[in-house]
Amino acid sequence: MNSIDLNCDMGESFGMYKMGFDEEVIKFISSANIACGFHAGDPIWMKRTVEMAEENSVGVGAHPSFPDLNGFGRRSMDLSAEEVKTDMIYQIGALKAFTKNNKLQHVKPHGALYNQAVNDEALARSICEAVLEVDSDMILVALSGSKWVEIANEMGLKVAREIFADRALNNDGTLVSRSQPGAVLHDVNEVVDRSIRMVTEGIAVTADGGEIEVSAESICVHGDTKGAVDMARELRIGFEKATVKLVSLRDLV
């Protein structure tokens, strides 16, 4: 039987502004990537989201970002290695303090920080150093097939390779930019079918109709995507029908 972790970005509300469908989506996932205040979220929403994940036996992970509230962390930035590392440590440490046992399952960088690390080895190393410095037992979630995964392995991190249920792929396995039409997938049946194939056959269909090989321990569905609740629910049902077991990252890495 195949096994996979289903993760979702959460805790992205801010003050009086509510984002996403966390209370519904949490019922169907196994890991939550919780915003740490730099692209979204604030201390109250961080605390609430951690508590909600723990109540639902969902793995708690930090979702740190570039310091970019106005751009939702999706704008590229050129920061020094020290800035990246200290920003990461600050955010991870803040979220960690809200957990019951002062432990996080994983760290998954957000938005531009994630996408830049795929192609920027120096940035990838700074991220890995930050994770190791906070807690070497945490799992880094990084794009499947990327040099970033190799770097993390070389540095002795626990790594979960990630694929995406609701995002279109380029032929090199990277995500199609959100600025491009069709970058985010909204058809629930398409998302479920392609996700099952990626997990059970190790094949992903790219934006131009090609096929590439993929391997992963975790698959992401975005909580702020239109139809996110239906998507998360149908993914879980679809995996069960395909005899794919949803498990904790700790059971896979």
Image (spheres, rainbow, N blue to C red):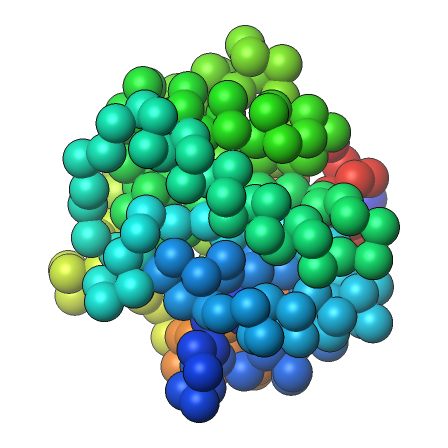
Q: Is residue 76 above or below residue 31?
A: above
Q: Residue 22, position in %: x, y?
A: 59, 78
| Quarter where residue 107 is shown | top right
Q: Residue furthest top?
A: 154
Relative to 2, is 154 on the left or the right?
A: left
Quadrant containing the N terminus is: top right
Q: Residue furthest bottom?
A: 16
Quadrant containing the C terminus is: top right
For the question of whether residue 243 can be seen, the reply is no
Relative to 211, is 190 on the left or the right?
A: right
Q: Residue 202, position in %: x, y?
A: 55, 38
For the question of whether residue 184 can be seen, the reply is yes
Relative to 143, is 57 on the left or the right?
A: right
Judge by depth and name the residue closer to the eye, 92 or 215: 92
| Quarter where residue 34 is shown | bottom right
Relative to 69, is 164 on the left or the right?
A: right
Q: Residue at x 59, y 52 (%)?
A: 94
Q: Residue at x 25, y 50 (%)?
A: 176
Q: Is residue 107 above or below residue 159?
A: below
Q: Is residue 137 above or below residue 66?
A: above
Q: Residue 5, position in %: x, y?
A: 68, 50
| Quarter where residue 241 is shown | bottom right
Judge by depth and name the residue closer to the eye, 199 or 93: 93
Q: Residue at x 76, y 45 (%)?
A: 103
Q: Residue 175, position in %: x, y?
A: 31, 47
Q: Residue at x 75, y 70 (%)?
A: 51
